Image (cartoon, rainbow, N blue to C red):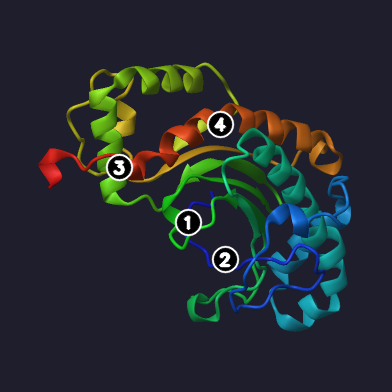
Amino acid sequence: MPWICWRWVSVPISSDKEPQPEPSLRLPFRQESEDMMMFQGYDQQTVDFLWGIRFNNERPWFEAHKETYLSELYRPMKDLGAEIYDFLSERRPEDAMMCRVSRIYRDARRLHGRGPYKDHLWFCVERPAEDWTTRPTFWFELGPDYWGYGMGCWMARPMDMAKLRSRIVRDPKPMEKLTKALRGQTEFTLGGDTYKRPKAGAPSELLAPWFQMKTISITHEEKLTEELFSRDVVDRIKTGYAFLLPYYDYFLTLPSDPEPETLK
């Protein structure tokens, strides 16, 4: 699962070069994506490269296969991100969203015995903010033997989670509706870090799981499927994100809630 705080950089969508570590000022994503091609699906070379970097995680191998990385993984990931960004922006035109594509290079300060490259790549669509890890974010990830997508706040602040519990107690019906919808489908599951000790106060057994969450993730993950190799995956992601938008709206407004009285 990708609910770990990796280092991100803004990606110039019009460039085919791997982004540099220095932060850059982004223009609105739509302006940058006008020259993007429509996503056509990944192919076997994409999977072969990901397996290759997993078992040959060293610079000579990567440099010898860098063009494959750019053409079969990095550029298709940007194309897919551009389409998903457009889809979400059309449905939330008031949100100044942006798309970030991860770097394949690991942070040299945090290798911990691992090779210098990641064996997976992902993008996120989110509101631009320095504390983006605390805000609801849409993501898609591809590895050599799995893929996944979803929405969540994977480094939610304790205060925001306290505000979530307080809002549920104050007005449980909206979250009851969201929870019933989540339980009534099979694409996504609720995940994230949980508190070791149970937290009391949930209005009902239905809503109790939200009281145990330290972070929030609503995710889908599975082995590689045929739809990844065609445009079918675009429709599946769009359908999934359309389902997740009400959850995004709900969590997006948490920071503006009043602080719970017990925590002041």
Q: Mark 2 Cα within 10 Å, few/some/many (few <14, many 20+)?
A: some
**Disc 1, SS:** helix
**Residue kind at label 4, given as amino acid type:** Leu
**Which one is earlier in the sequence, the residue at label 1 or at label 2?**
2
Judge whether 193 appears above or below 49 on screen.
Answer: above
Answer yes or no: do the residues labelled 4 and 3 have beta carbons within 8 Å?
no
Q: Which residue is label 2 attached to? A: 8
Residue 209 is drawn in which quadrant?
top left
**Residue kind at label 2, given as amino acid type:** Trp
Q: Is residue 188 visible?
A: no
Give the spatial CA distance, label 1 vs label 4.
18 Å
**Which one is earlier in the sequence, the residue at label 4 or at label 3?**
3
Answer yes or no: do the residues labelled 1 and 2 have beta carbons within 8 Å?
yes
Q: Which residue is label 3 attached to? A: 161
**Residue kind at label 3, given as amino acid type:** Met
Judge whether 262 appears above or below 187 on screen.
Answer: below
**Which one is earlier in the sequence, the residue at label 4 or at label 2?**
2
Q: Which residue is label 1 attached to? A: 132
**Which one is earlier in the sequence, the residue at label 2 or at label 3?**
2
Answer yes or no: do the residues labelled 2 and 3 have beta carbons within 8 Å?
no
